Image (cartoon, helix red, strand yellow):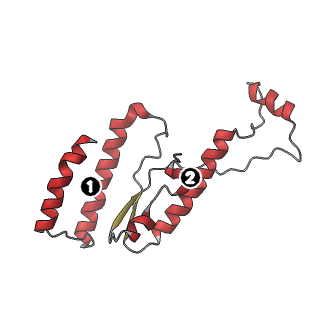
Amino acid sequence: MLLDGGYVDNLTVAHMKSLGADVIFAVDVGSIDDDNPQAYGDSLSGFWASFNRWNPFSAFPNPPTLSEIQGRLAYVSSIDALERAKTTPGCLYLRPPIDGYGTLEFAKFDEIYQVGYRYGQEFLAKLRDEGVLPVMEETEERKNLRRTMAPRRASI
């Protein structure tokens, strides 16, 4: 059985730390949640909820669907992971300016990619200027590892 990481641990900072990573880049690309409470009154009629969902002129909010509830649960889990990541030593938190894009806007992939790429370049340049960016020394072991990983990475 497979389970989406969003329900269990969508930001694996703790796991990366347990593997020995000293520096972790946590990139937050989640959408901003609408946390406005909705009032449905003291009780909720199934007939009324069903009728309201199909009534295009209704001004009353619809109760959330099962998929909306699941999405909200995944969001709550991811917020908790993000807050823990922000306070983890060695974890660098990034939030690219992608709030104007929706989760399912696949047609804008190239545009979103460029926004994230430029943001990443600016973030790394800032770290480099501040002297915070760790300098990775090129050792023979790293060269060999890169040689063995390159074909596999290209095949994915």
Q: Nearer the viewer, residue 59 or 7?
A: 7
Looking at the rendered structure, the kind of residue marked 2 is Tyr
Please name the residue that numbered disc 2 is placed on.
7
Give the vertical position of 116 relative to 67 (above or below): below
Q: Quadrant of the C terminus?
A: top left
Determine which quarter of the picture holds residue 92: bottom left
In the rendered image, the residue lying farthest to the left is 140
Q: Quick check: 147 left or right of 86?
A: left
Give the vertical position of 122 relative to 153 (above or below): below
Q: Callout 2: few (<14), some (14-19), or many (20+) C-alpha neighbours within 10 Å?
A: some
Residue 56 position in % (x across, y down): 73, 24
Q: Nearer the viewer, residue 136 or 94?
A: 136
Q: CA distance from mark 2 to mark 1?
A: 30 Å
| Disc sitting over residue 131 in the figure | none
Task: Tell me the residue at 58%/52% (across/down).
Answer: 75
Please name the residue that numbered disc 1 is placed on.
121
Q: Nearer the viewer, residue 28 or 57?
A: 28
Q: Quick check: 57 left or right of 141?
A: right
Q: Which comes sooner in the sequence, label 2 or label 1?
A: 2
Task: Tell me the residue at 40%/70% (across/down).
Answer: 18
Residue 19 position in % (x across, y down): 36, 68
Q: Callout 1: few (<14), some (14-19), or many (20+) C-alpha neighbours within 10 Å?
A: few
Task: Tell me the residue at 45%/67% (across/down).
Answer: 14
Residue 20 position in % (x across, y down): 34, 71
Residue 89 position in % (x across, y down): 40, 75
Label 2 with label 1: CB-CB less than 8 Å: no
